[in-house]
Image (cartoon, coloured by chain):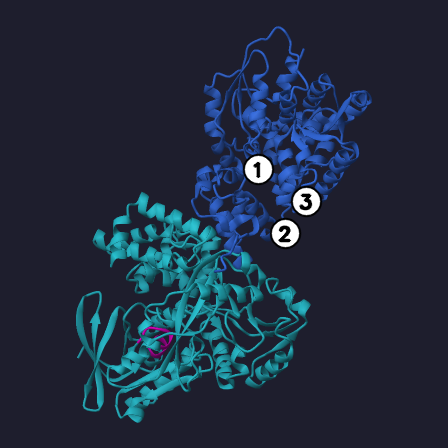
Chain colours: A cyan, B blue
Amino acid sequence: MENTYDVIIIGGGATGAGVARDCSLRGIKALLLERSDISTGATGRNHGLLHSGARYAVTDGESAEECIRENMILRKIAAHCVEETDGLFISLPEDGLEYQSVFVEACRRAGIRAEVLDPEEAKRLEPAANPALIGAVRVPDGAVDPFRLTSSNILDAKAHGAEIRTYTEVKELIREQDRIVGVKAYDHRAHREETFYAQVVVNAGGIWGHGIAAKVGITINMLPAKGALLIFGHRVNQMVLNRCRKPADADILVPGDTISLIGTTSSKVPYDQIDNMVITPEEVDILLREGEKLSPQLAYTRILRAYAGVRPLVASDDDPSGRTVSRGIVLLDHAQRDGLEGFITITGGKLMTYRLMAEWATDLVCRKLGIHQSCRTAELPLPGSVESREEVEKKNRRKPVAQRRSAISRHGDLAARIADRNSIQNSLVCECEEVSIGEVEYALENLSVNNLVDLRRRTRVGMGTCQGELCACRAAGLMGKKDPVCAKKAKADLVSFLNERWKGMAPIAWGDTLRESEYTTWVYESVCGLSDETEKTTVQ
Amino acid sequence: MNIQQNTVSENNFEQCIKCTVCTVYCPVAAVNPHFPGPKQAGPDGERLRLKRPDFFDSALKYCLNCKRCEVACPSNVRIGDIIQSARIKYGPKKNTSLRNFVLANTDLVGSLATPFAPVVNTAVSLKPVRFMMDKVMSIDHRRVFPKYAHGTFTSWYKKQAEAEQAAFPKQVAFFHGCYVNYNYPQLGKDLIRIMNSLGYGVRLLDKEKCCGVPLISNGLYQQALKQAKVNLGSIRRAVNEQNMDIITTSSTCTFTLRDEYPHVLSLKNDDVRDRIELATRYLYRLIQSGEVTLKFKEDARPLRVAYHTPCHMEKMGWSYYSIELLRMIPGVEVFVLDSQCCGIAGTYGFKKENYPTSQAIGEPLFRQIETSGADLVVTDCETCKWQIEMSTTKKCEHPLSILASRLA
């Protein structure tokens, strides 16, 4: 039957995508269901930090070891999603140096290279670091792009036969006696309900997994912990900067693609608020105040946006902050735990350990299906990371320099599939992030893009300083060409894209960011006449 | 809430709100599709280069540094400076072809050429020589070379003028630049005549080097820096020890001494910057203050001149002074041409690869000049003069030359 699979995976974050890839590589017929687009939850709302594990070395040795192992694996299998920047753990006068020796010792115990640097050497290596630093330790931190990572896993899963359905929301788990046999889901695009069957259902819904399990009366005691971050307009630092002290608020500054990110805060939020993340002025205050201590120039560097994600922490004690809760991977076989066969939950963990989480979950799926195939995801490079950098450069020679480098950093070796035969294809849609018409067309054809926000996640359209001012209408035009939709729908999409951009700017709307957003408003409302649509959506 | 009071970034690149008006005003982007335009090459590109230096695009060499982008920018972004600084910081470090070396070293080439000026001038106007220069050095064969003077301005000054200057009650220092020194000493002589008639003695700096602008645009930054330091040293001595203002006749030299030194070469000059001024502005202000009066010849032949605003005049906002000064001359009717780049941009238009761009940029200006009905064109920039004389049927003169010719 065409709606029958071996496994149904709920959730299109990094973990769900990883499970889909792992399953399909082991010959398991998989269906992934995601209520929105891929990487819209916690996967796309974090630091994009390629943890070395050093941050957890003192408090959680097990997580630290997992991190450094996965760190080394991702550098190989996902080279195009990773930037090998290294990181510094700096000690400021107010921190003292006592923690440093404990920290270095713990790193070494976990197998993390930790090199104590002379303060002058550290300042030379990273001129953006606070010059007041009295000590620094260099560790193999880096940056990882969660959108690319997830998209790459999805591409490979599809290539191996998995079916991916985004904008398809699981409404109900179908239970037959003490067994889950499938799901009922609502397709938000086709506006219809569908039923899918499988021998195993994997709940990889992150924090939303709590609600998915609750549909069949299973309680996973999750502790939604909100983490807010600020994005700065350009790269301030070239190495990840951490404070060498007990993990606290706003003590990591990550250089990610064209920007730098400071985060995070940590505050408990009620479960019913996880779809409604608002950044408070207090959070912005903390991020700036603490961020300046890592790198004083944050005080006067333009901020692009603010955003927050919800960590899917699994509560193991009564700590209200959610910071001391285990960040370890939690794999629940509900047959053993709750007497419900055919249903497993994979949660906890971190973006860094998504692959390992997928491996554990897929191992359990295999046991349930009686399949004896071992995991290969630690060795097989992801699509985009197959060919060498030199090879890729050669194949993209026709693209102008900045476009070529940007396209390669976004798509790795797949950048060669971006058409660049003429000046139209090489014209820019997004000027801040160097996204060409060719790249947008490639994304529309190959990367399951349904709207402008999806397109942003695949290409960085609208993620630069102008936040959609110039590219939104161009991208909308290209989408309309590919898939002629009614003008009303296209306008609504444009409005929702621009409003989503504004949402991130609102908490830090001052100075040039405010000036630029006013200009954007003028272009779209007064020149293009989008104001009617805006009013309608605001009312909604 | 702790709102950031102001955000700053190098050359204000983050103040850019992507309105793109700079690209609209860019003379190169309009005619050369290989140049990404000032917004892309400037603030947008800077953000990418901060990510990784290998985002540097060699197409930045097509920027002719006219700074019209900066004039157009409503957000005060120093777009041209961003591009020039990027070329210094990220561009090829060894960029000196023989051609660029020859074009950049106006001082050296000038001192070699002036003693043999008649021979050199004849030689570079010969077809076979120009053909060879095109093939061997990539200097376009269609480009007409400026004539060298037989003997420099400074040697004339020492022999003929220096002695009497000290007798004047007031003194100014003259930064003559390479053009006056090697190509057209007469302009320097005209200036001295005007200043002397107003009671000002004209002195030279104790040591003057080429301002460095051709070195900067040809990638010879270290040499530019060295020369800039020599010039600033001389200027400081003239200002501080002799309390002299520094006047100039070349708009680009003036702009370089005042603005490119601090912005592109990172040499502080705010202690003397306001004392460096274009001679036309200096004169205009003297006259306006009522301190001096120019005495003109009685019989004023009518003369219709078209004033061309060089890019760096536009940037400084000073073409007003030259135009108003011309209007003071009896019989002279001034018609102001649309302010647009003539395309030559110093050594830029000499290069074979830039020649078509250069001429395409200037085309609308040439057309306006031809239809203006002017007797001659007037401008403050020597390279604009070369371009206009080569590309139109009109002669082109410096405003001070017109003024001097009409003095009583």
Write down the region rendered in magenta.
Answer: A11-20
Q: Is residue A501 positioned above or below B275 on the image? A: below
| Residue A317 in view | yes
Q: Is residue B196 positioned above or below B19 on the image? A: above
Sequence-wise first label, 3 or 1: 3
Residue B268 disc label: 3
Residue position marked by numbered label 1 in the rendering: B348
| In the foreground, A29 or A500 | A500
Sequence-wise first label, 2 or 3: 2
Q: Is residue B24 left or right of residue A161?
A: right
- Chain letter for mark 3: B
Q: Is A14 part of what is drawn in magenta?
A: yes
| In the foreground, B356 or B242 | B242
SS type, badge 2: loop
Residue B93 disc label: 2
Mark 2, other Cα within 10 Å: few <14 / some 14–19 / many ≥20: few
Q: Is residue A357 positioned above or below B102 on the image? A: below
Q: Give the distance between the C-alpha atoms of the residues marked 2 and 3, in whole angstroms.
A: 24 Å
